[in-house]
Amino acid sequence: MSPLQQRIATFTDVTTHLITELHELEGLHERVREAELSARRLKRPARALRSHSSRGHRCSVASRLGTVGRRRS
């Protein structure tokens, strides 16, 4: 094998190895991204997970006491 052919073979081997490692890193990156998204979903406050229909109606203290719009004499 000539020196040029040896250099080409070495270059091909290194390139193949680097491409393989790049694919592995891309797979790991995807797994980390999915894990981060999953962690964000778990950290949401319980209030954000409830539907609109499960929220209680808020009213003022005055309306609960029945004093809204009435004047004392």
Image (cartoon, rainbow, N blue to C red):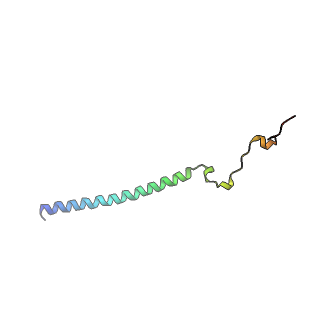
Quarter of the figure that contains the N terminus: bottom left
69 left or right of 32?
right
In percent of width and height, residue 63 lies at: 78, 43
Residue in the image at 44% along x and 57% along y: 31
59 left or right of 21?
right
36 left or right of 53?
left
> Hey, which residue is sitting farthest right in the picture?
73
Residue in the image at 45% along x and 54% along y: 33
Asked which quadrant contains residue 62, the reply is top right
> Hey, which residue is sitting farthest bottom in the picture?
1
Examine the rendered structure and indicate whether residue 5 appears above or below residue 59: below
Examine the rendered structure and indicate whether residue 67 appears above or below residue 24: above
Residue in the image at 79% along x and 43% along y: 64
The front one of 3 and 68 is: 68
> Hey, which residue is sitting farthest left in the picture?
2
Figure disc tally? 0
Quarter of the figure that contains the C terminus: top right
The front one of 69 and 33 is: 69
Asked which quadrant contains residue 17, the reply is bottom left
In percent of width and height, residue 21 lies at: 33, 58
30 left or right of 4?
right
In percent of width and height, residue 35 lies at: 48, 55
